[in-house]
């Protein structure tokens, strides 16, 4: 189930479901890296989830968002359901706008992604502030901006397996 | 939307499960339920511990590269720095040794005096040394994870101190590690007293690593630089542990309370080796009147 974007005339190979789950798992690993309270770090799970919900809305969706949100809640030791709620809403929005976003080029795509990621953070902020947590400062939102800048590289990397030619070439790495 | 024929919509060509909006409503309500149950009722510790079986290996795997880089950095650390540190530690040990000798004597004397005053014996506190592994990445709270857990007998509620003073309290225990909420967290309250005057108060985290003394009247006797120690009123923290130093006293705040900001004495935000003490049991007032009167007399006796 591939959707054409405005620039790609090329027909990609179909995505493999295990690759979606593997990339989500790697994103979770990146998020769980014990780097301390550095607010600028991008939320890799949100970014990769957003990517797959835009690219393959029928294979990745709110269910994946909920499961990985719960895992994030436990990994971060945050309020149970905080990430789950934000990721479900993110997956829904990304799936809804998927047809629209894919018509644009990488730059315009990232401009669509930025409000979605900031919205995810706003949901979490709202949930935590309404349960008496401390406001982490505006640097908290820098993570989303950095994640938006990563949109193009991440979509290139995650689509690499689908760029493979039909007939195998021994000299090509992927 | 295709108009339904006689009340029936045509069967779908592709099976895609429930409509997105239905799924959204179901999952969002599930998440909201989880949030409310976790925040209000604290029923989810079992679910958390169960699912931590999945996340703990992931966390260990994710920690490996960070640990590798750190230990590589330590390997290449300056030899001179290590030697200086070693010398300092040796000097400190000698100094502590003399203090320990005197401490033993004082302990004996204290026991005798307490027996004379008919007071309850101070409970012997046993403690475990633990290493802070990392700070929790949740930006809304201030917590760290230490490398001792259920298997080492750590209990929730245990006070955590470092070589200078109080750092926080164990709030969640996993099989192999435990989560410590720092005293600078907004939700963490600590019963304290001002060392110079003995006035009791409650200390809260104030964000950005500072602490706040709340609910003190504007005419309280307090100066900048005063030391704050634990009062031991909660029965969890031993009395007299150093907590903080008063940084600023703002007396013309509205609301009738003075706004007091303090800086923690211990290295609360810098993570190192910590000591996890066994939590004391809260001391409840005794039932019979005679015992109460006796302890009140004793209290009066030791008050200056």
Image: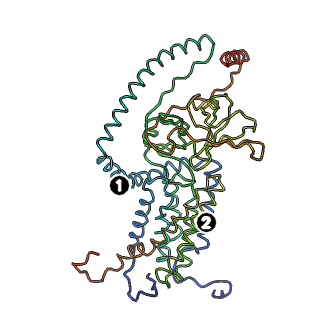
Q: Earlier in the sequence, mark 2 or mark 1?
A: 2
Disc nearest the viewer among 2 and 1: 1
- Percent across and percent down for residue B284 are 66, 26
Q: Chain of mark 2?
A: B
Q: Which residue is at the far left?
A: A170
Residue at disc 1, secondary structure? helix
In the rendered structure, the answer to whether residue B114 lies left or right of residue B137 reads: right
Task: Say if B102 sits above or below B231 in the image.
Answer: above
x and y percentages locating residue B3 in the rendered image: 66, 88
Give the camera-side residue of A138 and A74: A138
Q: Residue at x 63, y 57 (%)?
A: B33
Q: Are marks 2 and 1 on the same chain?
A: yes
Mark 2 secondary-structure assignment: helix
| Residue B175 visible at all | no
**Residue that sits furthest to the top in the current view:** B116
Q: Are marks 2 and 1 in contact (CB under 8 Å)?
A: no
Work out whether residue B150 or residue B138 is closer to the camera in this orientation and state it. B138
Could one spot residue B110 in this view of the protein?
Answer: yes
Q: Is residue A46 above or below residue B215?
A: below
Where residue B241 sits, quadrant-wise, is top right
Give the residue number, with chain letter if any, for mark 2.
Answer: B26
Q: Which residue is mark 1?
A: B65
Q: Position of residue B32 (x, y in %)?
A: 63, 59
Please rate how many residues cluster around mark 2, counting C-alpha atoms within 10 Å: few if below 14, some from 14 to 19, many from 20.
few
């Amino acid at each position: 189930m591939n959707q054409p974007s405005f620039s790609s005339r090329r027909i990609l190979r179909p995505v493999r479901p295990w690759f979606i789950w593997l990339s989500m798992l790697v994103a979770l690993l990146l998020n769980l890296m014990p780097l301390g309270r550095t607010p600028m770090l991008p939320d890799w799970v949100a970014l990769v989830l957003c990517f797959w919900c835009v690219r393959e809305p029928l294979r990745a969706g709110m269910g994946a968002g909920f499961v990985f949100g719960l895992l994030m809640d436990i990994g971060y030791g945050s309020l149970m359901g905080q990430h789950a709620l934000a990721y479900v809403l993110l997956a829904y929005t990304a799936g809804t706008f998927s047809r629209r976003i894919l018509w644009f080029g990488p730059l315009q795509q990232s401009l669509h992604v930025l409000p979605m990621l900031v919205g995810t953070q706003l949901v979490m902020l709202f949930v935590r502030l309404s349960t008496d947590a401390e406001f982490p400062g505006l640097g908290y939102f820098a993570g989303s901006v950095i994640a938006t800048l990563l949109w193009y590289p991440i979509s290139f990397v995650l689509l690499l397996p689908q760029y493979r030619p039909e007939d195998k070439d021994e000299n090509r790495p992927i | 939307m295709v108009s339904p024929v006689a009340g029936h919509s045509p069967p779908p060509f592709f099976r895609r499960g429930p409509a997105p909006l239905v799924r959204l409503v179901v999952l969002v309500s599930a998440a909201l339920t989880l949030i409310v149950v976790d925040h209000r009722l604290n029923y989810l510790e079992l679910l958390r511990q169960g699912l931590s079986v999945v996340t703990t290996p992931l966390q260990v795997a994710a920690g490996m590269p960070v640990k590798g880089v750190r230990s590589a950095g330590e390997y290449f650390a300056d030899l001179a720095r290590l030697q200086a540190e070693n010398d300092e530690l040796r000097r400190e040990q000698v100094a502590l040794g003399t203090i320990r000798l005197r401490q033993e004597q004082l302990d004996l004397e204290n026991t005798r005096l307490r027996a004379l005053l008919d007071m309850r014996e101070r409970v012997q506190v046993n403690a475990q040394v633990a290493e802070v592994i990392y700070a929790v990445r949740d930006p809304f709270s201030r917590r760290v994870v230490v490398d001792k857990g259920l298997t080492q007998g750590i209990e929730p509620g245990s006070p955590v101190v470092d070589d200078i003073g109080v750092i926080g309290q164990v709030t969640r225990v996993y099989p192999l590690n435990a989560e410590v909420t720092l005293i600078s967290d907004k939700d963490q309250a600590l019963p304290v007293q001002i060392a110079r005057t003995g006035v009791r108060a409650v200390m809260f985290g104030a964000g950005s690593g500072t602490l706040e003394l709340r609910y003190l009247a504007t005419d309280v006797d307090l100066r900048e630089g005063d030391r704050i120690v634990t009062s031991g009123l909660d029965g969890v923290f031993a009395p007299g542990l150093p907590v903080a130093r008063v940084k600023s006293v703002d007396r013309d705040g509205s609301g009738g309370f003075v706004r007091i900001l303090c800086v923690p004495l211990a290295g609360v935000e810098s993570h190192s080796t910590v000591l996890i003490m066994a939590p004391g049991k809260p001391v409840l007032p005794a039932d019979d009147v005679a015992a109460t009167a006796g302890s009140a007399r004793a209290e009066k006796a030791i008050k200056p």
